[in-house]
Image (tube, rainbow, N blue to C red):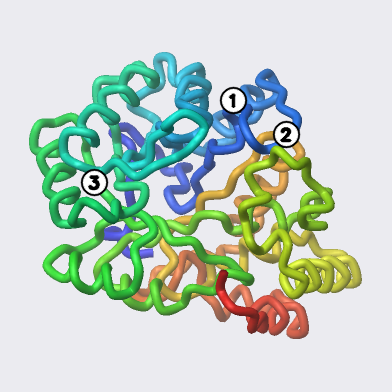
């Protein structure tokens, strides 16, 4: 991958994989079923021990608890880590609302820095555009934070194709978090950001619906208090059927479902990083297996315009029927 698409911590090594990030939303202990903080800490520590250096969080996640948890592994290795956090969503009682004015973003940034116990953030992003605040106004605030040295990079999240084209035309290589996976195939957003953004994929397994656990059964596999009840794919028969088809096919070929999806996503044009969540060590093992598969088989691409991985190399190792299924879902993006 070309160097301009790489985000690195202050101190790095040749073993760093800046295209593979670990997300922390589900680690905070709210809204994702039974929680074991000690297990989440083991996941974070094991991720670090196995060379992962990029961690994504947000002040919104579990009322700040995800940031507090992440802080516990930072210790003396702060400059070896790339910490990405976000502002623009805040809690109001039990409800979440947008809040992306310059004053609010600054306050949220200070609160995140306090929870993380750091005097700088590697990447601070607008989590979602605020309907009541022009995106340009929020961007101006992020640029000011960088000018002041509070953050090293600024970025955006969840912009539409039109918003990307309008607001990032003058800029190059701005990190942008994109919801993309075989179910939620937002190809047009990746295309719009091809020469504007470092596209970082969020929810590659659609919050577990495309995984191998009980949540792959949709709302039948989660509790009534689970955040994912608000995810429309969890009650969409076509999406659940697709996940089950994928399970059957990967079982037939004796291939990891998670590995298959991550390889497929990272071989797509315009994908520059993938943020995969894990709160159990078994889930992390799948992510580390993906990392090992990529490195051992030399799948990484160095061609401009390609994704993280060289598609011809990945496809050559894939059963054709499985590759075709991953790109075949035609359900409406919900």
Q: What residue is shown with label 2? A: 281
Question: Is 172 situated above or below 238?
Answer: above
Q: Which residue is mark 1?
A: 45
Q: Nearer the viewer, residue 43 or 163?
A: 163
Nearer mark to the viewer, of 3 and 1: 3
Among the two numbered marks 3 and 1 on one chain, the one whose residue lies closer to the N terminus: 1
Identify the secondary structure beneath mark 3: strand
Q: Residue at x 42, y 36 (%)?
A: 58
Total of numbered circles in the picture? Answer: 3
The residue located at (54%, 30%) in the rendering is: 48
Front residue of 60/171: it is 60
Give the image quarter of residue 302. Answer: bottom left
The earlier-in-sequence mark between 2 and 1 is: 1
Q: Are marks 3 and 1 in contact (CB under 8 Å)?
A: no
Vertical position of residue 52 compared to residue 317: above or below: above
Instruction: Tell me: residue 325, above or below residue 154.
Output: below
- Give the alpha-carbon distance from disc 3 to disc 1, as whole Å: 26 Å
Residue 313 spot, x, y in % from top left: 59, 76
Determine which residue is flagged by label 3.
154
Left or right of 140: which side holds 250? right
Residue at x 66% of width, y 63% of height: 233
């Amino acid at each position: 991958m070309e160097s301009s698409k790489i985000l690195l911590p202050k101190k790095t090594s040749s073993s760093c994989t800046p295209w593979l990030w670990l997300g922390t939303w589900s680690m905070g202990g709210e809204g994702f079923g039974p929680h074991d903080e000690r297990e989440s800490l083991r996941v974070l520590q094991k991720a670090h021990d196995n060379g992962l250096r990029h961690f994504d969080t947000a002040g919104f996640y579990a009322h700040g608890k995800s940031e507090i948890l992440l802080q516990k592994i930072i210790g003396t290795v702060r400059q070896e880590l790339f910490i990405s956090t976000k502002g623009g969503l805040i809690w109001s009682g039990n409800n979440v609302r947008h809040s992306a004015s310059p004053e609010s973003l600054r306050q949220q940034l200070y609160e995140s820095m306090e929870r993380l116990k750091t005097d700088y953030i590697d990447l601070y992003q607008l989590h979602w555009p605020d309907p009541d605040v022009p995106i340009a106004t929020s961007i101006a605030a992020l640029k000011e934070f960088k000018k002041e040295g509070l953050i090293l990079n600024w970025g955006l999240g969840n912009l539409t194709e039109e918003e990307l084209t309008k607001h990032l035309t003058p800029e190059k290589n701005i990190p942008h978090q994109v919801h993309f996976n075989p179910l939620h195939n937002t190809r047009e957003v990746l295309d719009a950001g091809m020469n504007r953004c470092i596209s970082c994929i969020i929810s590659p397994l659609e919050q577990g619906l495309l995984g191998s656990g009980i949540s792959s059964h949709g709302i039948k596999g989660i509790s009534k208090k689970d955040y994912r009840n608000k995810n429309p794919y969890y009650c969409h028969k076509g999406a659940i059927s697709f996940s089950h088809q994928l399970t059957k096919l990967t079982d037939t070929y004796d291939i990891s479902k998670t590995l298959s999806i991550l390889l497929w996503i990272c071989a797509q044009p315009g994908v520059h990083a993938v943020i995969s969540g894990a709160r159990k060590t078994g889930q992390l093992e799948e992510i580390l297996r993906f990392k090992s598969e990529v490195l051992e088989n030399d799948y990484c691409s160095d061609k401009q315009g390609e994704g993280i991985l060289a598609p011809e190399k990945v496809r050559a190792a894939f059963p054709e029927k499985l590759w075709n299924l991953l790109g075949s879902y035609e359900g409406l993006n919900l």
